[in-house]
Structures are given as C-alpha cells and as structure tokens.
Image: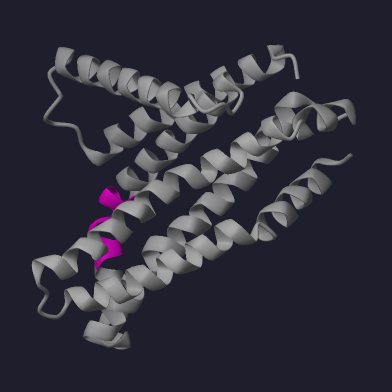
Amino acid sequence: MSLWNVFRMELFKNLHDRTNLLIMLVFMVANILGGLLLSSNLTFMSLLPLGFMASGSMIFLFIYPYQMARTDYRNKVMSLLIASGVSRVQYYFVKIGATLLFSFLSVLLVIMIPLFVVVVAMEGISDALKYFNIVLEIDAGTFGAIFFTWLSAFSILMTSVIISRGRGFTVFVFLGIYFFTNQIAAFINSDSGILWNLNFMEMIIQHIIIIVLMGFIGILILRKQDL
C-alpha cells in the first residue's frame, strides 16, 4: 500500500467522522453567538454558559487529536497496515500529518472563524480585514510563538499516545512530559540569565527542539513496539 493511499484513507476516515465534525460545528456556532453576546450588556448568570462553552471548546481541541491518534491502536488498524508493507516510520509521519491537518481544521472552525465573524459583525468587513492585517503585520513574532507553542504541545501529545498505546492514562503522560520539558527549558533559561529576556525567535527555537526531540522519541518507541 502506497503512502498516498494511506494518507487518503486517513482523510476519508476523518472526513466521515460525523460525531466530531458535528461537535466542531456546534462549538463554532456557540462561540459565534457567545462572541456576539459579549458585545452587549450581560449579567453574571448569562456569562456562565459562555464560559462553559469556551472551556468545552478548549477541552475538545485537546481531546480531538488524541482521539484521532489513538484510534488505530484501539482498532488494531496500525498492526494491519504495518503487515501490508508500510514501514512504521513512514506511517508515523503520515498519521501525524493527517492528525495535524484536522487539528488545525478544528482550531479554524472552533476559534478562528467565530473570532472573524464576531469582528466582522462588530466592525464591518473592511475594518475587520484591516484589523487582521495590522495584527498579522505587527505581531508576526507573537503569532509564530503561539503557533510553535501549540505545535510543540501537539508533538508531545502524539508521543504520549505512542508511549501509552492510546490508553486512558495518556493525559497523565502528556502532562508529565509537558511539565518536564517546560521545567528543563526554564532551568536552562534561568541558568543562562535569559529567563525574562527571551525574544520570540529564541522561544520558537526552543519549541522546534522539543518538536524534533518528541518526533525522534516517538519513532524509536514505535519501532520497538509489539503491534
């Protein structure tokens, strides 16, 4: 089986996952309505469901890639694909790529589109586009730091899934690795005297190192696992 066919299979499987797609649409609509309501006068009691939906959105953005990554362990699909001639390393990158693509789609639907719609509703389409252009131009470093922070957290999650074989304690493995890597980074930065002077490029480099390290660990473990 070719890698392209494996990737197409992943796309087909995720695009036909109606439950998760429906949840994303529900959160998208709820966040749009919530954002519009925030521009009006609200009471404390009316803010509670908005906070609940925002918290639910963030939890879903974590659970969704975890669920996609663990599916092949749970359904024994990974062992069947390996038996068909696809190498573990090749499948690793195809699986990670497809999961990353749909994770980005979930962020786009749940956060970015509602944010854009709310800004358009409040400011108008022309002013909204100008606003987003200004934000991207001025805060390109901030955007890059946020993106690579998310990407490094994603790589830690994928490695945690491989270590735990997609079992329920994956979240604890993720939190342990995430806490450990952050403590190591904080120790190195404080030891070198740059803890409070990191620029965006240095932060991005640190996250890239974490991404590469997690990928290397994930490949090593996957090669030795009895699937």
- The answer to whether 79 appears left or right of 61 in the picture is right
Q: In which quadrant will I find the N terminus? A: top right
Give residue 62's quadrant in the image: top left
Please name the residue shown 31% across and 22% down the image. Answer: 179
Residue 11, x across and y down, in percent = 70, 54
Magenta-colored stretch includes residue 198: no
**In this rendering, does residue 160 appear at all?**
yes
User: 83 or 209: nearer the eye?
Assistant: 83
Q: Position of residue 2 (x, y in %)?
A: 86, 41
Q: Left of 218 or right of it: where is 112? A: left
Q: In the image, is 49 to the left or to the right of 57? A: left
Q: Quadrant of residue 76?
A: top right
Image side of residue 226 versus residue 31, left or right = right
The residue depicted at 53 percent of the width and 43 percent of the height is: 65
Above or below, comparing residue 129 to residue 201 in the picture: below
Using the rendered image of the protein, determine whether residue 130 is visible from the camera's viewpoint. no
Would you say the magenta stretch is mainly helix, strand or loop?
helix
Residue 147 x %, y %: 38, 47
Does residue 187 sit above or below 97 in this rendering? Answer: above
**Quarter-of-image position of residue 21:** bottom right
Q: Which residues are magenta?
A: 135-143
Q: How is the image coloured?
A: one colour
Q: Which residue is pictured at 37% across the width and 55% down the height?
A: 57
Q: Nearer the viewer, residue 17 or 87?
A: 17
